Amino acid sequence: MQKIFGGKSVSSKKALLLGAGFVVKPTLTLLSERGVEVTVACRSLEHAQRLCKDVKAAKAICLDVGNEEALDAEVGKVDVAISLIPYTFHPLVIKSAIRKKKDVVTTSYTSPAMVELEKDIQEAGITVMNEIGLDPGIDHLFAVKTIDEVHQAGGKVKRFLSYCGGLPAPEASANPLGYKFSWSARGMLLALGNTAKFFKDGKIEEVAGKDLMSVAKPYSTGYTGFAFVAYPNRDSTPFREKYQIPEATTIVRGTLRYAGFPELIRCIVDIGFLSQDTQDFLKPSSDPISWKDATAKILTATSSSEQDLTWAISSKHTFADTDEKTRILAGLRWLGLFSSDPITPRSTPLDTLCATLEKKMAYEDGERDLVFLQHRFEIEHKDGKHETRTSTLCEYGDPDGYSAMAKLVGIPCGVAVMQVLDGKLPKGLLAPYTPEICDPLRKELLDGYGIDMVEQTVA
């Protein structure tokens, strides 16, 4: 078990931790080291037992959150329920917590389904704390800090940009996408289809999912060792109100990737590999077809020769120039789409491609991940002077411990759980959007766990 720096064993409380993902272990370990008795609940008892191995005061159970009676029984035994399962299941956990008058912590965005429960949460007198991981979570804590400091000094935040990337460390990024999967490839690829909405120069702009990679641009973070591109992510417009910056004319929250990612993804989209339509030739079979034959059928190419496949790709996708064409075709070749290797059939082009991506682009032993998060504030001070300030977090994973992503999601979650257990957070449906909530969380993350964002004036 990796020892987490910081934290004192001061609690005799009990928690129910629901989930089986990679962020569970840092949260579990932090709570154990703080003296909390944790019950880890998964649909698979074996998985829960693996998570609990070598963790003091932790026990494993098998639990289906869809079983209301069983969920209520376990929630009733503890002081707080930590929901690290997919966000669609959070309302089931919150409803159980309302019935049993227990607190809840999640790392997910506050969803409309949660908001519908707000009155019941208040009447039950419980705390439901959301959005306390990395993104969302750490990003809020430090955005609120700087915005509040500017406002307290009489200034205005005229433009706010925030970009975050979970990536392989540069030395582990040697593949055409510069990306590796520690979670579902399907989830990442589907997220690329979400419409982006943001404020730009006082007007709301929207970018359809199919066009998202076309608006990705090189992004200078001031750290010249990184060649990042950035693109907007989902709906940034609510953050004008959430961050209390009505004066801001531009507000964009988005994603960072390494250079080369958007061009290859755009080609993959154009040639139909993100289709979710079921195809007979992609259905599970004891004798699956080759990748080149599958590619020919998806492209409706005249044959499965690489020349004909290339012609078919060129008819569906426009390359910026010859160099880009060469690079993208090399990327598709690396992925195996022109090869005689058998596919792993999963019925749709998207899912069949995901099976290959997860195999070819998984983290290998000893490889590190990287989390890079940066806010950029364009500030107009009270005296009329202008300043551009950045706030940056750059964190590498530990090959012998936690990944950067697991640490930066799991530790803030654990810290928030402790604040709930210690009665330091108010009752109700919460997220970290005020100094009153953010300041104590940020201080404990820095003092206890060394998690910080570094501010610099860059202009």
Image: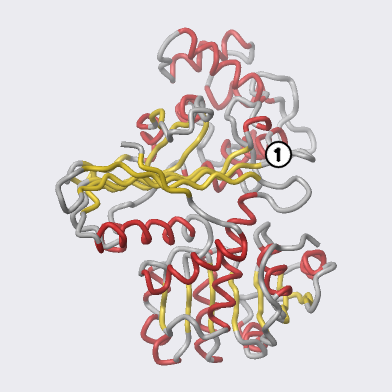
Q: Vertically, is 219 above or below 64? A: above
In this orientation, which residue lies closer to the viewer: 449 or 431? 449
Q: Tag 1, which secondary structure?
A: loop
Q: Looking at the picture, how far across and down is residue 241, in whole percent? A: 26, 62
Residue at 60 percent of width and 16 percent of height: 330
Which residue is at the far right?
Answer: 54
Does residue 195 appear anywhere in the picture? no
Q: Vertically, is 86 above or below 309? A: below
Quarter assignment of residue 243: bottom left
Q: Looking at the picture, how far across and down is residue 459, in whole percent? A: 30, 36
What colouring does the structure picture have?
A: secondary structure
Q: Vertically, is 196 above or below 226? A: below
The N terminus sits in image quarter: bottom right
Does residue 184 appear anywhere in the picture? yes
Q: Tag 1: Cα neighbours inside 10 Å, few (<14), some, or many (≥20)? A: some
Q: Looking at the picture, how far across and down is residue 219, in whole percent? A: 40, 32
Tell me: 445 left or right of 154. Answer: right
Q: Amino acid at mark 1?
A: Ala
Tell me: 106 left or right of 146. Answer: right
Which residue is at the far left?
Answer: 384
In this orientation, which residue lies closer to the viewer: 245 or 345? 245
Q: Looking at the picture, how far across and down is residue 91, in whole percent? A: 49, 75
Tell me how many marks there are.
Answer: 1
Residue at 77 percent of width and 60 percent of height: 2
Q: Vertically, is 371 above or below 133? A: above
Tell me: 459 left or right of 99. Answer: left
Which residue is at the far front?
Answer: 383
In this orientation, which residue lies closer to the viewer: 14 or 440? 440
Residue topped by disc 1: 362
Residue at 24 percent of width and 45 percent of height: 250
Residue at 51 percent of width and 47 percent of height: 393
Quarter assignment of residue 123: bottom left
